[in-house]
Image (cartoon, helix red, strand yellow):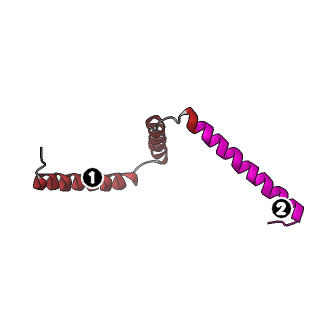
Amino acid sequence: MTLDKALYQQAYRSYRQWNEAEAASRARDAAMLTSVEAWRRYAALVEFCWRLSPQPSQHQREEKLAALDRYYAAVKRLEKRRRASGTSA
């Protein structure tokens, strides 16, 4: 099965024009939103993204915790050296 190149390009152009028109419409309408409605939309978007994003695996959680432990250990060593040398930066 092969795609008709001209038909594909025409569909792509149409989609791009539609997408640009939608973006322009959203930008135009955003100026008319109340702060409460804008906040509600933002909160709904955040909730949607949280639901859409996959949960990290147990291994990924363990790796992240190990990385944080290494980071804080390095910060503690740096702070200890800073105090021992008497520098304030």
Nearer the observer, 45 or 3: 3
Horizontal and vertical percent position of residue 26: 34, 51
Neighbourhood count class around disc 1 (C-alpha, 10 Å): few under 14, some 14–19, many 20 upward? few
Q: How many marks?
A: 2
Name the residue tied to disc 1: 19
Q: Secondary structure at mark 1?
A: helix
Kindly identify the residue that appears in the image at 31 percent across and 56 percent down: 24
Residue stretch in magenta: 61-89
Using the rendered view, name the quadrant where residue 66 is placed: top right
Look at the picture and state if 76 lies above or below 46.
below
Q: Amino acid at mark 1?
A: Asn
Q: Is residue 9 left or right of residue 57?
A: left
- Is 78 magenta? The answer is yes
Most common SS among magenta residues: helix
Horizontal and vertical percent position of residue 57: 53, 34
Q: Nearer the viewer, mark 2 or mark 1?
A: 2
Q: Quadrant of the N terminus?
A: top left
Q: Is residue 61 left or right of residue 48?
A: right
Q: Quadrant of the C terminus?
A: bottom right
Nearer the observer, 78 or 44: 78
Q: Secondary structure at mark 2?
A: helix
Horizontal and vertical percent position of residue 72: 73, 49
Name the residue tied to disc 2: 82
Horizontal and vertical percent position of residue 77: 80, 54
